[in-house]
Amino acid sequence: GSSHSETGLSHAVRLAKLAGAELLVMVAFDPPSRLHRRGLLPPEEIVQAMEADAKELAGEAAQLLQSKGIKVRAMAVRGDPSEAIIGVSQDEKVDLIVMGRRGVQGIRGMLLGSVSERVLRHSEIPVMVVS
């Protein structure tokens, strides 16, 4: 993940330790699409690679946190990152979303607004954004 994501994770760890809470580490991935005669389809190899990377990243974070005595679950979710964060947070009934100010999204983030901004605007769950 990005350095901002790592900073967000360290803040979440401190809060979890203080509250005795469980952390849910989520990595969202949104594969690019290519035009197909039936619509837009992401190439399957890209989807598989992105999913494997997301699962690996979430798993590594969970292992690190478990080694520090934090109760943690990890998941990789396919879809628009802001929608995935909000949807999973609602489904899992989390108390607080903690995230880094910037992730790894490149030009798209500059044009459409960052994931953290969209989550802040649309989430009904409190959001803590750290940098």
Image (spheres, rainbow, N blue to C red):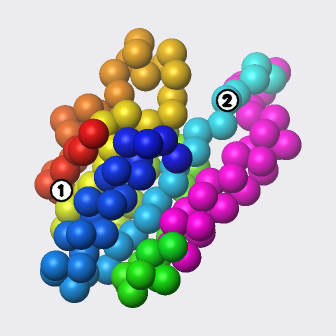
Which residue appears at 30% of the width and 69% of the height? 13
Can you give x and y, in whole percent of width and height, for residue 93 in the image? Answer: 26, 70
* Residue identified by numbered label 2: 32
Q: Is residue 59 above or below residue 50?
A: below
Query: Under tag 1, what secondary structure?
Result: loop
Residue 94 seen in render: no
Which residue appears at 36% of the width and 59% of the height? 9
**Is 51 included in the stretch rendered in magenta?**
yes
Which residue appears at 55% of the width and 63% of the height? 58
Pick the front one: 129 or 31:
129
Q: Quadrant of the C terminus?
A: top left
Q: Which residues are magenta?
A: 37-63
* Sooner in the amino-acid sequence: mark 1 or mark 2: 2
Residue 36 lies left or right of residue 89; in this view the side is right
* Residue identified by numbered label 1: 125
Q: Amino acid at mark 2?
A: Pro
Mark 1 neighbour class, 10 Å CA radius: few under 14, some 14 to 19, many 20 or more: some
